[in-house]
Image (cartoon, helix red, strand yellow):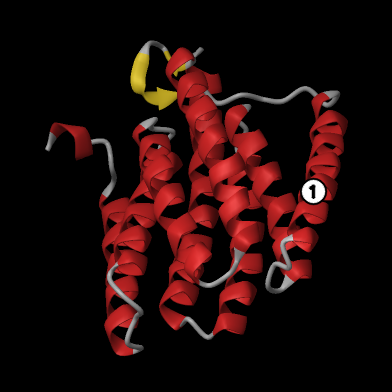
Amino acid sequence: MKRFSHFSNGEILLWASSAAVIVLTYFGFGGRGLLPLIASLIGVTSLIFCAKGNPVGQVLMLVFSALYSLIAYSRAYYGEVVTYLGMTAPMALFALIAWLRHPFHGKKSEVAVNALPKREYPLIFLLTTVVTAVFGIILAAWDTANLALSTVSVATSFLAVALTFRRSPLYALAYAANDIVLIALWIAMRDWSVVACFAVFFVNDLYGFYSWKRMQKRQRATR
């Protein structure tokens, strides 16, 4: 219980309601196998930890990336497989290391929020463009389903993981943008349980941005 004591009642309610939506949608629309349900619950749990700047969120994101890649592979969304196994999972590991190396006042359960210098933004966007172009060529060669959306997913995913690694509150907005892309991808596949998963992720990522901005303000006031 001590591990969860730093969550507010509102955050616990957010997690519980998110999990409830995922479960109800899964059973209501006849989800395909248990893997999407398990992955979705792990994913939404990772987001509430990430919203608090807790490194446990990155550990759970590694697990989610592996499970989601299996789901995407079974639907021929090879772009998502490449994105999550080749980029999101490794970057989650790097983010985990970065978050553990930069705790706020030595508190391992909360990362120190970083204010990115303006000179870093052009570099991040340049890297995003290069990575998207390379992955786009690979995805086209693999005859990936919904190539255009899959390529946009690569761009938003890389931007999100790069900002997560740099401990910027903007990471959550980038993930929210990625959620919108993924909602469109899975609507095309008519897999409504996965659509519900990313709709819930979208709400949680918006809260993550709000939470990180509050953390940033509080941390600046206590330095």
Quick check: 152 left or right of 210?
right
Quick check: 45 left or right of 117?
left
In the displayed structure, would residue 33 be above or below residue 106?
Answer: below
Whole-percent x and y of residue 10? 31, 55
Whole-percent x and y of residue 185? 62, 73
SS for tag 1? helix
Quick check: 46 left or right of 91?
left
Point out the image quarter for the N terminus.
Answer: top left
Q: Which residue is drawn at 59% across and 62% down?
A: 179
Q: For this rendering, which residue is in front, 207 or 89?
A: 89
Location of mark 1 (residue): 132
Q: How many marks?
A: 1
Whole-percent x and y of residue 32? 35, 79
Q: Which residue is drawn at 56% across and 82% down?
A: 189
Q: Residues within 10 Å of mark 1 (few under 14, many from 20)?
A: many
In the displayed structure, would residue 185 be above or below residue 134?
Answer: below
Whole-percent x and y of residue 198? 50, 66
Quick check: 144 left or right of 28?
right
In the displayed structure, would residue 190 be above or below residue 48?
Answer: below
Q: For this rendering, which residue is in front, 3 or 96?
A: 96
Q: Residue at x 48, y 81 (%)?
A: 191
Query: Which kind of residue does numbered mark 1 sit on?
Result: Thr
